[in-house]
Structures are given as C-alpha cells and as structure tokens.
Amino acid sequence: MKKSVLSFIAIFIAFVAMSQQEVQVQSGPQLSLDKDIHDYGTMLQNGDGLCHFTVTNSGNEPLIISNAKGSRGCTVPKWSKEPIMPGETTVIDVKYATNRIGPINKSVTISSNAVNTPTKVIRIKGKVIKPEDAEASPIMKNSEGAPTVE
C-alpha cells in the first residue's frame, strides 16, 4: 500500500510539472503558402501557363527567399529578392511553357531562411492539349476559375 501511495504521488508531481511548462514558440521567420499545388486543369497548347503562389511570413523576423528553382527549364519561377517582413506577403510567379502537348507534373523548390521549412517544394500539374482537340470539348474552369478545357 505504501508503494502505491508513493507511486501515485510521484505520478501526480510529474503531471503537475509537465502541465506547468510553457509551450515554446519557435522564433524567427516562418514560410507559409496559400497552396502547395496549382492545378491548371486542361489547357490549350501555347496558352497562358502563368500561376501564382502567395507566400506569407508568419514568423517574427524577416523572411528571405534566397532561391526558387524549377524542376525543368519549362518551369520558371520569379520572386522578390526583398525581405518579407513579419505578417507581410509576396507572390512567387511560376510560368510553365505550354508549347508541349501532354501532362504537366513539375515542381519548384523554394530555399529560404525560414525556421519551419528552409526548403519547400511546390508543384504544378495539369494537361496541355492541341487546340483542334479542344473544339470537341466544352470549356470549363480550373480550381482558380481560369478557363480550361475538359
């Protein structure tokens, strides 16, 4: 009985000590994105392959995007080299060359000084079709409301 009372007291003390510890918040710049994937849907050959990813600094120090690199030469990102202050946003534009027919499945790797994700991979996907193939298909809209062909 004495051992069980001592065990109970030890567990109770450990529980109280753990519940009084404060949760530590990670200090520094933090990268947050509005989306990880942009879906173009089905689009026409030589159509507009531009899309946007909104980046927010959800940390408490300036966020610096040092590089953004497409997985292939047909995927070209553009971003501001200026620091993104805490709570502020910027946009990474990604341009896909739509001259090739077929599926799109590419990535862009973002490198930054973010403490939560110093390297972040975003993706683009979809399908490029010939204009003559679109004549038989009804015009639809992709996930962002842009015209697409289904």
Image (cartoon, rainbow, N blue to C red):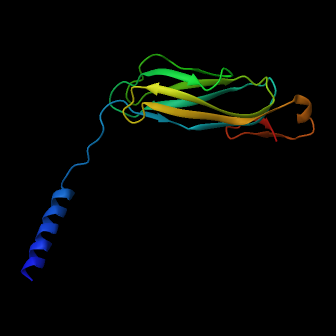
- Residue 76: image quadrant is top right
Residue depicted at 43% across the width and 28% down the height: 88
Residue depicted at 42% across the width and 30% down the height: 118
Q: Is residue 21 visible?
A: yes
Q: Residue furthest bottom?
A: 1
Q: Position of residue 4 (x, y in %)?
A: 12, 78
Residue depicted at 71% across the width and 26% down the height: 49
Is residue 123 toward the left or the right of residue 57 in the image?
right
- In which quadrant is the C terminus drawn? top right
93 w.r.t. 138: above or below: above
122 w.r.t. 150: above or below: above
Front one among 131 and 71:
71
Q: Position of residue 135 (x, y in %)?
A: 92, 35
- Residue 63: image quadrant is top left
70 w.r.t. 8: above or below: above
Q: Is residue 146 visible?
A: no
Q: Residue furthest top?
A: 81
Q: Position of residue 104 (x, y in %)?
A: 72, 33
- In which quadrant is the N terminus drawn? bottom left
- Residue 117: image quadrant is top left
Is residue 139 toward the left or the right of residue 93 in the image?
right
